[in-house]
Image (spheres, rainbow, N blue to C red):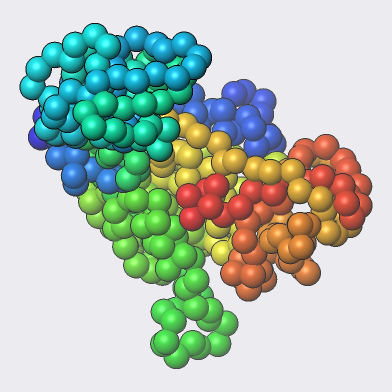
Amino acid sequence: MTGLKPPPLRNDCFALPAGVEWTPVDAALEMLRDRLGPTTGTETCPVAQALGAVLAADAVALRASPPQANSAVDGYGFAGAVPEGAHVMPLKQGRAAAGVPFDGVLPTGHALRVLTGAALPQGVETVILEEDVTLGDGEVAFRGPLKRGANTRKAGEDVAAGAVVLREGRRLTPADLALLASVGIAEVVVRTTLRVAILSTGDELTEPGAEAGPGQIYDANRPMLCALVQRLGYRVCDMGRVPDDRASLRATLDRAAAEADVILTSGGASAGDEDHVSALLREAGAMQEWRIALKPGRPLALGLWQGKPVFGLPGNPVAALVCSLVFARPAMAVLAGETWSAPQGYDVPAGFEKRKKPGRREYLRARIREGRVEVFASEGSGRVSGLSWAEGLVEIGDEACHIRPGDPVRFIPYGSFGL
């Protein structure tokens, strides 16, 4: 482990420009992208164990891929090109196979048995498929034309030695591990796993399975957010439920800051009497309430607690998930050392009708059926069942619109958010 640590975030990293009240979604995302940076350290990791890790430095090829010119097919190799017409060549004894090179030089005008992946011996530039050859007694016959280099792979045609194969900020996939191994890389420098503390606030919450008293509801946000963080590849620090008590919340935030790199809270992030998350962040002098022009989930409290970024999510599960996917997800990726990435959306014909006023962006729970996007029957943010019913979100822009069946709308599947 290198012990290298990035600089801490500034206290004003979430501050809005003077005079800003309602923040457009794109402006909020741009501010997060520009102001946040990695908060995790680095370590050296074997490639075989690096799945899901984030590169902390560019990965450079130690040798070319392929390292030598080789055959792309099973066949017979010879020098140069051959013109159109019939050709007969004497067959050199021996063969070249993958991992068992031919020991010698092939004379000009002769052919040699060559198998797929075999390094081309000196004197072999071209390979003809075995299906196109008639094999005789010590000779082969075939028809041209055939270009020089046909059915072969050049050395380094995939990756040149010394080339950057993967950039810093890349979250490694199974295919990436194959690429790294193919160019001789056994270890990579990666970011330590981002630790995310999650806590729910509110006297009204109780644990699923427990007896719910009058006015109480089960805590749906915490299991949802814990699963989301885990699915994104980060380490969950479950801080549990915190009652509407400022001292208890302060102690929990202190513990979260000691154990995690970033803190996600749900509930208590507005400006009411029992909104203790925002109150404590204000006391700490590092609180910003972003009144984001979107539906659902307009208020988003952002701040620092003992130098750790805090995302105060809405208490409503629908709004909490939407804000997590749209804002917290890309922000956590940057904090984890990844490059910023926007979710990939697709234009799909609408299977619904909707009128929308200007001024804010809307996200509708949606899924695709028979080539069209259908949306959940109710836009009510209290309808938690719609999150499970949906397979993604329809994103409707800030401007006024009247969507009719068949009109193209932007559908973002949950998979594009990393779920």
Q: Is residue 287 left or right of residue 240?
A: right
Is residue 340 shown above or below 256?
above
**Residue, x 71% and y 60% (percent of image)?**
368
Give left or right: position of 38 versus 224. left
Residue 146 in picture, x, y percent from top left: 45, 17
Residue 353: x and y in percent read 89, 57
Location of residue 352 by image quarter: bottom right
> Is residue 43 visible to us here?
no
Whether residue 173 is visible here, answered yes or no, is yes
Query: Which x, y percent locates residue 198?
Result: 37, 58
Snapshot quadrant of residue 305: top left
Q: Residue furthest bottom?
A: 211
Foreground residue among 92 and 359: 92
Is 392 displayed left or right of 153 in the figure?
right
Q: Is residue 392 above or below residue 9?
A: below
Q: Quadrant of the N terminus?
A: top left
- Residue at left 18%, top 18%? 121
Q: Nearer the viewer, residue 90 or 265?
A: 90
Location of residue 247 in the rendering, given as x and y in whole percent from the top left corner? 33, 60
